[in-house]
Amino acid sequence: MWENIIEYLKDPLLVVKVQNFFGIVYKKINNKDETSVIHSDRLEKYEEFDIKQHKRIPSDNSGSSITSSDTETSEESGPDELDLMIGNKFWYYLFVIGTALGDEIFYATFIPFWFWNVDGAVGRRVVLVWTVVMYIGQGFKDIIRWPRPGYPVKKLQDKWAIEYGMPSTHAMVGVSIPFSVLFYTMDRYQYPMHWGLIIAISWCTLICVSRVYLGMHSVLDIAAGLVLASTLLLVLVPLVDYLDALLLTSHSAPLVVFAVSILVIVYHPQSDKWTPTRGDTTMIVSVCAGILIGSWINYQLGNMSPPQATPPYRIIWPSVEMFGCLLLRTTLGFCGVLATRAIAKSFSYAVICALLGRDKNELRNSEDSLDNKHKIFVECCYKYFTCGLIGLNTTYVFPNVFDLLQINRPTYYTEI
């Protein structure tokens, strides 16, 4: 019974059915340049007939470009070709936005914005939960090594297509970030909890459906990501609540954070092929390490003190003056993040290449493979240094700059 359920959820045709439901139309073009519209039921019959002439296309070779409703995409798939059209642009743009909620651009904007403008105590906990969940999800990908949906699924996004698909880390992010925010704010602030729950469920649903719609994950990948992340949250939410206080007050916290972050990167599960998984994991872990160390410095220097009032707190909506400071903080902060990334990336890459005695341009343009040990080492080192510095600046350097400019949040150093 369970095997049948797993095979059904893993079936690429189920992905096609979801795509059909949201307006994506598949077409078959034969050798005579004749086209006919194929929906999932007819595609199943077509696949059974044609499967003898086709091999399942691996996930890293099955990406396709996107077109509008009057422009078609195609990729070779044997004697007959399958094309697709986007019949409903509303769903397409909505799901492109939805999938962006699990991308690095979202992390790079959401995390600093939250620290500078919302709540640092909640931010530290959410980042730590997100890091652990993502590390475990990324590790399982390279252990299980299940490909993303292949033929006949057409992918509407090439990004991460070379990675394995089980479990969906987008689905895990869709659980870990909104629901950990909900759990850590429900007793801290006065707001209608049902609205927080509605937002968290909508956020998670949008991300999950977007990954199937774009052809990047099977329904089984999504289900596995949801179950794994939900199980981890049950353990992590109370554990991280305890660890946060320990990591702020312990004198050895920076050494522990630094050592653990290095070890988990070094001993990240190995794949049988090169994928960007390890590099992405390095970025996530190093951002978390930088944020935790920056917060520790603030506490040890005496900048942070407990709040005078006890939770739950009333939400203070920004006045015109407060909103102006928010915009100024955000603008200056993001400019600082971009400058940090550009300078630190260039500097660290050049220094590490020089220490290895390798030409940086030659190494940067060399082939991505597991045998290219120098490139993997340099990539992990410069990403760790760059993203760790961004995390440190987010919680320590930039807030002190905001203080000098008198635009910092009054409660920033009371969020313990």
Image (tube, rainbow, N blue to C red):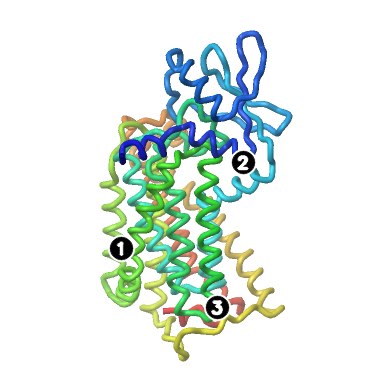
**SS state under label 2:** loop
Q: Is residue 236 left or right of residue 15?
A: left
- What residue is shown with label 2? 22
Picture residue at 67% right of the left edge, 13% below the top: 34
Between marks 3 and 1 in the image, the one whose residue lies nearer the viewer:
3
Who comes first in sequence, dot 2 or dot 3?
2
Residue 107 appearing in the image: yes
Kindly identify which numbered label has been placed on residue 191: 3
Q: Which residue is mark 1?
A: 257
Residue at the front extreme, as displayed = 1
Q: Position of residue 44 (x, y in %)?
A: 50, 25
User: Is residue 381 visible in the rendered structure shown here?
Assistant: no
Above or below for 34 versus 249: above
Q: What amino acid is found at the position of numbered circle 1 in the picture?
A: Val
The kind of residue on which mark 2 rests is Phe
* Alpha carbon distance from label 2 to label 3: 34 Å
Across and down, in percent, residue 313 comes to 51, 84
The span from disc 1 to disc 2 (Cα, nearest Å) is 45 Å
Residue depicted at x 62% and y 28%: 84
Camera-side residue of 206 and 144: 206
Check the image and name the residue furthest to the top. Answer: 32
Q: Nearer the viewer, residue 320 or 32?
A: 32
